[in-house]
Image (tube, rainbow, N blue to C red):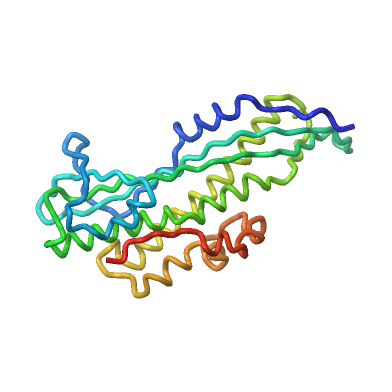
Amino acid sequence: MPLPPARNSLAPLIALALAVLSPAVAPAAEGPLRHEAELVRGVLPPGDSCAAALERATEVTYEFHAPEGNGWGGTTFYHFDYRYDFNYRYWVVQRPDGAHTRVAVTVVPSVHVWHVVRLPRGRNDADPVYRRVRRHELDHVAVSFDERPSLLFRHLATHLPELDLPPPARTKAAIEKAIRDTIGACAGAVTTLIQSSYDRLDELTNHGVVGLPDRAAFFESLYTEEGLVRSRFPYLAAVEPLLVTPRYRNAPRPRCDD
């Protein structure tokens, strides 16, 4: 017999802990970063119109470090912070190895993506090397701010299959841990996908030394079915219905093309 629905009233707090204590932070292009004391926060010089489209759409914090000799570059950090609430109902199924707990989950997720971009201090668009570094770092921002990864996570979280927990698992703590672990695995797969896209950008450009041969094609291909296959995304079958929707195909993907 199905048991009454159980609501997890602690889910918002648990999810906040996941987002704050375990944010997905991925370093992008390599560069010599100075100590934190030598970093200053600020805004890009007026000539940096390249960032306008991204700044209108996403949250980017710029930090500037003091370059040393000729060995200076940039770095981008992305944060894929996710929170969720959930409720569930469960019932027991008798099997040869004992009583299994089946769990049906309803999840309400949210995602906040933000970035920290570190660039050389005291440089501007008059310096062609600086322009190359800046564009490459903003390309990393475009890779992770593309809305499709967030849509993938939301789809996975809101379409969780029924969980089947072997005995002994019929406790509130065990059930809710299994739910949190399942949602966490979905988020982990998405952040791994983003990191794979970061790595591909660096591979194709030698960490920004050369330009992308076809910028539009690169960004478009990142989170298509082909891109997910290339990155060995483990939930491909689960997200296939999402991939063909207009919402996914037309998802915002702002980038800098100056």
x 55%, y 62%: residue: 228
Query: With respect to residue 58, does 89 lie above or below?
Result: above
Residue 113 horizontal side relative to residue 166, left or right: left
Residue 92 picture location, percent across and down? 84, 33
Quadrant where the image shows the C terminus: bottom left
Q: Say how many tags the image has.
A: 0
x 28%, y 56%: residue: 51
Quadrant where the image shows the N terminus: top right
Query: With respect to residue 132, does 108 lie above or below?
Result: above
Residue at the far bottom in the pictured view: 213
Residue 99 picture location, percent across and down? 84, 32
Residue at the far left in the pictured view: 69
Query: With respect to residue 72, does 129 lie above or below?
Result: below
Residue 19 picture location, percent across and down? 48, 35
Residue 90 horizontal side relative to residue 86, left or right: right
Residue 247 horizontal side relative to residue 51, left or right: right
x 28%, y 63%: residue: 208
Residue 130 picture location, percent across and down? 17, 59
Task: Looking at the picture, tell me which residue is in the foreground, 146 or 90.
Answer: 146
In the figure, residue 21 lies in which quadrant? Answer: top left
In the figure, residue 167 lies in which quadrant? Answer: top right
Task: Looking at the picture, tell me which residue is in the foreground, 139 or 228.
Answer: 139
Task: Looking at the picture, tell me which residue is in the foreground, 147 or 143.
Answer: 147
